[in-house]
Image: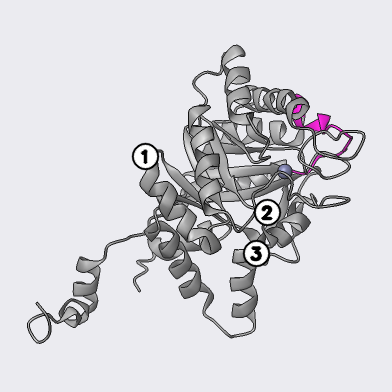
Amino acid sequence: MAFPITRLRRLRRTPALRRMARETRLSPSDFIYPLFVCPGRGVARPVGSMPGVFQHSVDRVVEVCRETAAEGVPAVLLFGLPETKDDVGSSSWADDGIVQQALKAIKAAVPELVLIVDVCFCEYTAHGHCGVLTAAGEVANDPTLDNLARQAVSLAAAGADVIAPSDMMDGRVGRIRRGLDEAGFEQIPILSYAAKFASAFYGPFREAAESAPAFGDRRSYQMDPANGREALREVGLDVEEGADLLMVKPALPYLDVLREVRQRFDHPLVAYQVSGEYSMIRAAAERGWIDYERVLMESLLSIRRAGADLVITYGARDAARLLRKGWQE
Ligand SMILES: [Zn+2]
């Protein structure tokens, strides 16, 4: 029925009617908060390119986790800044590695918080690539797989609740699954960075995680931003290999991919609102060009509307606080 019978404005007339007719909602339980753990004590070092984001020492990260859980955010995603780097990234599987220390301390202090760990090598290798290199300087796929499994087992042993491989090697979900199962961690789920694009939106993260590659780029393993159909093949393979949760990264520039993955797969779906997405909002807000809170909430709502169940976001705590204060658009 067309106008004048149908008037869509009828349900937009008051805040109460709009709330009633709203299709997508946000809740603090939709968010995962990323954290960067560094050596030392009492350290809270601001990341210049990401206002509001810090590198925290273990003692400080425990406090942040306590606050995050109290704000209703159910999970954090941990990245480590190790004391030492080498060619293979061996500090990533050390029993006293930086993330291992953080896991033990957070588990003891905030047992209800879900601890997701990023599994990769770019923060741990001297060359900054996500695996071991061949003599020609290429990232070698298969030798990296055993190291990934080793890192995953070490993190599970230290108390990780979810293993999240971000390296984009072929076959890594299957290899990590086997490694976890053989070590008795068959109950630990894998959140696969299933469709991870070689994105320029990761720029600020490299300062936060001190993980910029020393040479070249990551385009031989991360996905070409032009490829939507290939993303579905990537996701399909990770599903076959045993991924429990799926991720699309970045989020806002890839909402079409998120929607396609949602339609094809029934797994819990996670989107990563990456550093560049967050910092663009913060930077424009600092200049007075946009409203940080409103744009943050609209971006998160859009990501959920496209099909994500959960959003990894540096704005997780800000969004949770706004929602608890009764945020309504
Ligand atoms: Zn990496």
Q: CA distance from mark 1 to mark 2?
A: 25 Å
Label 3 or label 1, whichever lies nearer to me, is: 1
Residue occupying image coordinates x 46% and y 62%: 300
The amino acid pointed to by label 3 is Gly
- Does the magenta run of residues contain 92? yes
- On screen, residue 22 above or below 245: below
Which amino acid, mark 1?
Asp
Nearest the viewer among 316 and 199 is 199
Nearer-N-terminus badge (2/3): 2
Query: Which stretch did the figure color magenta?
Result: 80-96
Residue annotated with mark 3:
276
Of residue 74 and residue 139, the one placed in the foreground of this image is: 139
Q: Are marks 2 and 3 in contact (CB under 8 Å)?
A: no
Q: Position of residue 212 (x, y in %)?
A: 81, 52
- Magenta segment includes 90: yes
Q: Position of residue 240 (x, y in %)?
A: 49, 28
Rate crowding at label 1 as few (under 14), some (14 to 19) or many (20 or more) other CA atoms within 10 Å: few
